[in-house]
Image: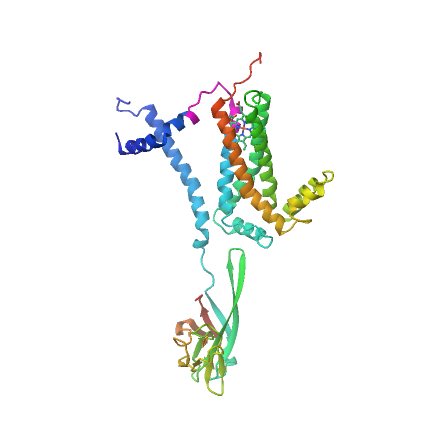
């Protein structure tokens, strides 16, 4: 046995790595098609957004004085800054599309039915969180487009009867867009929503592993 | 297990996967490292020859203050620092250029013609015309620009500024 094998075995004996591997990855799956890869694609995109997002926080500053300049700096001065930001920027739109397509696939294949209702419900929240990530992230560059898109976006909440104005002020952290808006959007974008998404993916995946995935519906279904 | 001298299919797939994995790792990893260490690889631009104007402007034997500012860009933030130097022109047109920062606790010193010394307003240190400590707490003479950091071109005086 090679040293490498021995080392692996030592850890395996204690951590049960092969058990994890066989439960998580060596699952029995029905014969399915490419549409069934959209969930994994969503997860990979989430990881990609996570890694590039963490990288961006190395230089980005969530303050009205510096947000725009710090992004300019990332784009023009930092080595590969354009690449990291580009991936995060395009990945954001792609993730919304892919997660949405994944929802459509689980809907049209009837995969939300018993016993997978909770997978569907956590999925609904995952989609909402993903869209929330897009909404909060869009403000961060603090350019004209971001500013006015968020002005419009938050005022939509203002249309809710009775409590609309209040929701609007909670979102903005005041009556107008300000340093407070930028700070809370940043906080939600990098802490609250990612934490929620990680927790939801945990439940989502637990359900997948526990129940296995559904097969492609047949004519009889 | 491969009994033949040829590479088995499994081995081949492992090898190709390892190779492709390594290439992908490098393509992703190297830019990531470059991104993180980027500010440390930037060349400092603070060094420059500063023009102090025509030598004629500086009377012989009388230390004359010249103020200038240097701006420094750190990322997206620009800071402007001001500096002052005393130019002492000698009869042979050579010059001594002294920093006006006291070597005790960095107050700015002033030339006092009556006493022919630089006086620090903070703790009353005195420095001579050549920067030597004449009295007070400073541990060393005023900083001066070395001869190769001072040049005269077409009658104009320059000093080579470096960040301390
Ligand atoms: C961040 C977003 C999401 C991630 C990372 C994710 C991940 C996954 C993964 C890896 C699977 C395994 C099967 C497959 O890939 O098709 C899956 C299945 C499933 N997902 Fe999602 N998902 C997300 C969002 C959603 C949304 C928005 C919905 C619906 C509202 C949803 C509903 C489901 C359902 C019902 C299944 C079970 C499919 C089956 O058993 O055939 N998911 N998800
Ligand atoms: S700072 Fe000049 S004497 Fe103390």
Can you give x and y, in whole percent of width and height, for residue B52 in the image?
A: 50, 74
State the residue lying farthest toward the bottom.
B114
Whether residue A141 is visible here, answered yes or no, is no
Q: Quadrant of ligand 1?
A: top right
Q: Is residue A32 left or right of residue B141?
A: right
Can you give x and y, in whole percent of width and height, for residue A81 in the image?
A: 50, 47
Q: Decide whether residue A30 is among the magenta residues.
A: yes
Residue stretch in magenta = A23-39
Which residue sits at x=42%, y=44%?
A: B30
| Vertical side of A47 occupied by A57: above or below | below
Whether residue A85 is visible here, answered yes or no, is yes
State the residue lying farthest toward the top.
A220
* Count of numbered labels shown in the rendering: 0
Can you give x and y, in whole percent of width and height, for residue A9 in the image?
A: 31, 30
Image quarter (top left, top right, bottom left or bottom right) of the C terminus of chain B: bottom left
How has the structure been colored for display? rainbow
| Vertical side of A59 occupied by B63: above or below | below
| Vertical side of B86 occupied by A67: above or below | above
Q: Decide whether residue B161 is among the magenta residues.
A: no
Displayed quadrant of residue B117: bottom left
Which residue sits at x=49%, y=49%?
A: A58
Image quarter (top left, top right, bottom left or bottom right) of the N terminus of chain B: top left
| Vertical side of B69 occupied by A218: above or below | above
Can you give x and y, in whole percent of width and height, for residue A100 in the image?
A: 59, 30
Compare residues A128 and B18 and report the one nearer the observer. A128
């Amino acid at each position: 046995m090679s040293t490498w094998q021995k080392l692996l075995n030592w850890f395996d004996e204690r951590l049960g790595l092969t058990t994890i591997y066989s439960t998580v990855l060596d699952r029995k799956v029905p014969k399915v098609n490419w549409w069934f890869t959209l969930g994994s694609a969503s997860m990979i995109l989430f990881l990609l957004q996570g890694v590039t997002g963490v990288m961006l926080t190395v230089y980005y500053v969530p303050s009205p004085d510096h947000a725009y300049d710090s992004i300019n700096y990332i784009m023009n001065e930092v080595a590969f800054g354009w690449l990291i930001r580009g991936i995060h920027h395009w990945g954001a739109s792609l993730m919304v599309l892919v997660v949405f397509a994944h929802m459509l696939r689980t809907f049209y294949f009837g995969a939300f039915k018993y016993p997978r209702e909770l997978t569907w419900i956590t999925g609904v929240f995952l989609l909402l969180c993903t869209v929330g990530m897009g909404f909060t992230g869009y403000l961060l560059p603090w350019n004209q487009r971001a500013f006015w898109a968020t002005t419009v976006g938050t005022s939509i909440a203002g249309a809710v009867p009775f409590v609309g104005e209040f929701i609007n002020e909670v979102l903005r952290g005041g009556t107008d867009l300000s340093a407070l808006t930028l700070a809370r959007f940043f906080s939600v974008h990098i802490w609250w929503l990612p934490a929620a998404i990680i927790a939801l993916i945990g439940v989502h995946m637990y359900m997948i592993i526990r129940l296995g995935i559904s097969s492609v519906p047949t004519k009889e279904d | 297990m491969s009994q033949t001298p040829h590479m088995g299919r499994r081995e081949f797939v492992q090898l190709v996967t390892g190779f492709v994995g390594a290439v992908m790792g490098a393509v992703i990893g190297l830019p990531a490292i470059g991104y993180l260490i980027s500010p440390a690889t930037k060349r400092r631009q603070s060094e420059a020859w500063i023009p102090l104007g025509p030598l004629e402007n500086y009377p012989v034997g009388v230390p004359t203050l010249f103020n200038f500012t240097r701006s420094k860009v750190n990322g997206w933030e620009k800071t402007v620092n001001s500096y002052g130097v005393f130019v002492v022109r000698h009869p042979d047109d050579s010059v001594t250029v002294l920093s006006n920062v006291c070597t005790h606790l960095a107050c700015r010193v002033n030339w006092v013609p009556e006493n022919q010394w630089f006086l620090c307003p903070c703790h009353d240190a005195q420095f001579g015309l050549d920067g030597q400590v004449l009295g007070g707490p400073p541990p060393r003479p005023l900083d001066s620009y070395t001869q190769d950091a001072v040049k005269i071109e077409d009658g104009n005086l320059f000093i080579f500024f470096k960040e301390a």
